[in-house]
Amino acid sequence: MKIAAKPALAILGKRDLELGPFTVDEAPLEAGPWANWRLRADEDGIAWLLFDKKGSSANTLSEEVLAELDAVLEKLERDRPRGLVIRSAKRSGFIAGADIAQFRGVTESKQIEALIARGHAVLDRLDRLPLPTVVVIHGFCLGGGLEVALACDYRIAVDNASFGFPEVLLGLHPGLGGTVRLPRLINPVQAMTMMLTGHTERARRARALRLVDVVTQERHVRGAVKSAVTGEMIAAKQDLLGRLMNTGPTRSVLAARMRGEAAKRAPRQHYPAPYALIDNWVSHGGNAEAMQKAEISSFAKLLVTDTAQNLVRVFYLRENLKSLADGKWGGRRVHVLGAGAMGGDIAAWCAWHGFVVSLFDTKPEPIAGAIKRAAELYGKIGRDDRRRIRDSLDRLIPDLKGEGVATADLIIEAVPEILDLKRKIFAGIEPKMKPNAILATNTSSIPLEQLREGLPHPERLVGIHFFNPVSRMQLVEVVSHDKVADAVLADARAFLGRIDRLPAPVKSAPGFLVNRALTPYLLEALVMLDAGMKKETIDKAAVDFGMPMGPIELADDVGLDICLHVAEMLRGSVGREMPDPPQWLKDMVAKGELGKKSGKGLYDWKDGHAVKAHEEATPPPDTIDRLILPMLNVCATCLREGVVADEKIVDGALIFATGFAPFRGGPMHYARTRGVADIRDTLKRLAAKYGPRFQPDPGWDTLK
C-alpha cells in the first residue's frame, strides 16, 4: 500500500543527502513542468536531477515518470550542462523498481511490448546523452531503478546502498535493458546469477563486482561527483574473462549449468522466466541490439502468463498484510519466556531489530544455546555489519531470575504446548507486569479462551504465533479472542511490523488457520504412506504441484512430535472427521525418532537434508486432490466460521507460512481458478471413495 507523503526534501535534515544546488526550503517549491523531477544546475555547471515521485513515499517507475524523464533529457541535449547527476530525493532510497500496479490484469502482450519499447527508448537516450552522466545511489536500487543506473556512465554508491533485480520473484526478468547492460558490465555469470535469483548485493560487494565505480559516505558525495564529471574517476569495465564468457560457445556451456541450478528451485513448467532469460542470453548475448529486442518480446509474453499474474497478486497479498502493521507502538523492551528452539529464536530476532530482550529459562544451558544460535544467525544475516552484530548480542540479555518481566513492554511466552504449564506461568508473571504491558502467547494450537482462564486482565492477552524457523518464516498469526482489547491487537500487529514480519489476524479456534489447514494435508500423506505408497512418490507429487517440499519431508522438518501433538489436539475439535495418526507414528515419537532434529524420522537425515531414494513411482491420479483439497476445505471452514476475515488473508497466510505454490496465487485463488463447483464435486467423489473426512464444508455453497 502506497502512503502519500510530503515531498521528501521537506523532512530531510540539511546534511542528510548531498542534493547539489537544492536547499531544504526551496527544493519542494521548485517551479517546473514536471510533477516527479526537479532540475537545477550548481555553481560548477553540473545539472542535478532529483527524482521525487509525487504522492509516494518511495520512487517507482511508471509510464508518466519515464515520459517526464524523456522530456528532461531532451532539455539537457539542448542545454549541454557540464555533466548530469541523478539522485533520489526520498529518504527511503533511489528507485524501488517499476510501479507494479501497471502490470495487474494485463492480457495483451503486444500492448506491453509497446509500453516497454517506449521505456527502452528513454533509457537508451540517457545512455547516449553527450555529456558525463552520474547516478548517486543511497538505500535500495532495485529492478527498473538499477536499469536506470546502468544507463549512466558512473555509479556512485553511498555505503548503505543495495542493488538487485527482483523481477524473477514476479515471474519476470528485467525488462528495461538490464539483461543487455548488466552482462556487458560485470562478469556474465555473476550478472545472470543476480537476475536468476533476485538476490540483492550491498554497496561494497557491488563495488567488488564492478557494478558501481565507487562507494563513499554521504559527506564525500559532492567530491566524488566532481571526480566523475571531470574524468578523474575511472569507470568500471568488464575484464577480459568477462568478455570471454560472453562468447557464444562459452555461453552455451554456462547456460547448461544455469538451467540445472534453476530447475532445483523453480521447475520450468511452473516458472518460465529463468529459462526465458537463459535462452535469450545464449541466443543473443553477443549482440546488444538482438538481446534488447528479445528482452522486450520475452518480458511482454511472460507478463501475461498465469504465473506472472499470480505472483503479482502475491506481491499485493504481501502489501495487504504489511499494511495491517502500519500502526505505531512505542515499546522498547521484550521479555521471552522459554529459551528453546522457538523462544530463543524469537528473542534473537527481536534483538536484531533493535529491542532490548531479556530471555528467561529455568536452566542456563538453554539460554546459552539460544545465544550461540543467535550469534550464528547474526553472522549469516549481518555479514560484514559487525557493529549491528555486536549491538544485537548486547541487547540479548540472559535472565535466569525473570527480572525482565517488570520492565517489559511485551512478554512472549514460548514454553511447551501444555495448557496447565502455560496457565501456571501466566498466573506467576501477570502481577509483576507493567499496567500497559502486553502478554502474548506463542501457542500453535491451544484456544486463547482456555489460556485466559484465571487472568485478572484477559484484555491484554493476545496470541502472537511464529512459525519455525523464525528468521525465515515471514508470517505470524495474531490471534484474538472476544475479551482482548482492540488496542492490544493493533499494538501486536505494529510490533510485528517493527521486526519485519507479516501479521495475519485470526480468531481463536483450535489450530487457528495455518496449522488447522496444514494438519489434514500432513495426515492424508501419512494415510497414503500407511497404505503402501512410497514416501518419495508422495513428496514428488506435492512438489510437482508446486509445494516447496512434500508433506512427508515437511512432517520430518517440523518434528513428528509436534505434528502428532497438533493432530491429536485437533481431531475432536474441528467439526470434521480426521484420520487417526497411525500407531507406528506414535511409536516413532515414543522412541525419539522425531525427524530432522533427531537425525531420523520418516526419512533418515544427513547434513540437514533428507536421504531419499532416487526411484519414484507414478502416483495415482487422485493423489494431489487427496493432499491439497482437504487443505482448501479447511480454508472454506475458517472463512465460514469467521476465523479469518477474507480470502486475501487466507491466501497470504498459507503462501507465507507454508509456501503454498505461490505461482497459483494462494489456495482460495486456486479454488476459484479451478472452479468452486469442481472443488466441491471432487471432494464429494473423494468422500465416497475414501471416507467422510473429504466431505465438502458448507462454506463452499456460500462462496460466489
Image: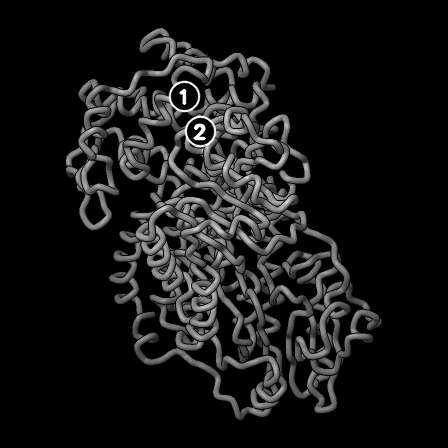
Disc 1: which residue: 570
Is 47 above or below relative to 652?
below
Q: Residue at x 47, y 23 (%)?
A: 510
Labelled disc at residue 392: none
Quadrant (top left/top right/bottom left/bottom right) for the C terminus: top right
Is 431 on the left-hand or right-hand side of 567? right
Is 274 above or below relative to 684?
below
Mark 2: which secondary structure? loop
* Residue nearer the viewer, 419 or 123: 419
- Sort mark 1 into few (<14), some (14-19) or many (20+) by Cα contacts within 10 Å: many
Q: Residue at x 74, y 67 (%)?
A: 11
* Residue nearer the viewer, 206 or 125: 206
Disc 2: which residue: 445
Task: Give the percent coordinates (x, y) of residue 164.
Answer: 48, 62
- State whether residue 656 appears in this view: no
Task: Give the percent coordinates (x, y) of residue 402.
Answer: 46, 49
> What's under tag 1, amino acid-wise?
Leu
Q: How many marks?
A: 2
Q: Residue at x 62, y 64 (%)?
A: 92
Q: Residue at x 59, y 68 (%)?
A: 123
Q: Are marks 1 and 2 in contact (CB under 8 Å)?
A: yes
Tell me the CA gap for discs 1 and 2.
8 Å
- Sort mark 2 into few (<14), some (14-19) or many (20+) by Cα contacts within 10 Å: many
Task: Give the percent coordinates (x, y) of residue 478.
Answer: 55, 37
Mark 1: which secondary structure? helix
Task: Give the percent coordinates (x, y) of residue 636.
Answer: 52, 21
Looking at marks 1 and 2 on the same chain, the residue that comes earlier in the sequence is marked by: 2
Q: Which quadrant of the view contains residue 623? A: top left
- State whether residue 149 appears in this view: yes
> What's under tag 2, amino acid-wise?
Ser
